[in-house]
Image (spheres, rainbow, N blue to C red):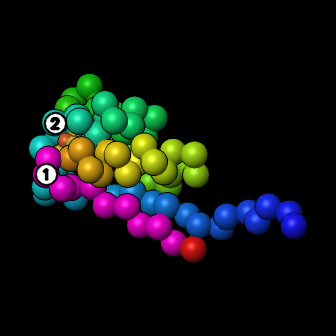
Amino acid sequence: MGARKSRSRTTVSVNNDRCRRYGICVAEAPSLFRMTTDGGLRYLRTVPGEQVEQAKAAVRSCPMLAIELDERR
Ligand code: SF4
């Protein structure tokens, strides 16, 4: 039996009203989140499959519960 290719797609969204720009998500998942020079937060909306675990760690680490992951199949 051949390996089945996963078609799931994970997207990230950050609630800007909750986010306090602590940057903990950046420390947990630096390839997904980054701080801008003017103190804003930038992030990849679509998470590459191999980085989903990092994205989940960022969700758990956020003290403001500002990060949401949406996994679709
Ligand atoms: S850890 Fe949460 S509050 Fe801090 S920058 Fe990331 S999303 Fe914002």
As shown in the figure, which amino acid type bears the numbered disc 1? Answer: Met
Q: Secondary structure at mark 2?
A: loop
Q: Is residue 68 shown in magenta?
A: yes
Ligand 1 lies in quarter: top left
Residue 7 as seen in the image, left or right of residue 24:
right
In front here: 2 or 46? 2
Percent coordinates x, y for residue 22 in the rendering = 16, 36
> As shown in the figure, which amino acid type bears the numbered disc 2?
Tyr
**Which contiguous range is marked in magenta?**
63-72
Q: Is residue 22 left or right of residue 10?
A: left
Q: Is residue 6 above or below residue 45?
A: below
Quadrant where the N terminus is found in the figure: bottom right
Earlier-in-chain disc, 1 versus 2: 2
Residue 17 magenta-highlighted: no
> Any atom of ligand 1 within 8 Å of the CB at mark 2?
yes
**Residue 64 place in picture, x, y as percent:** 13, 51
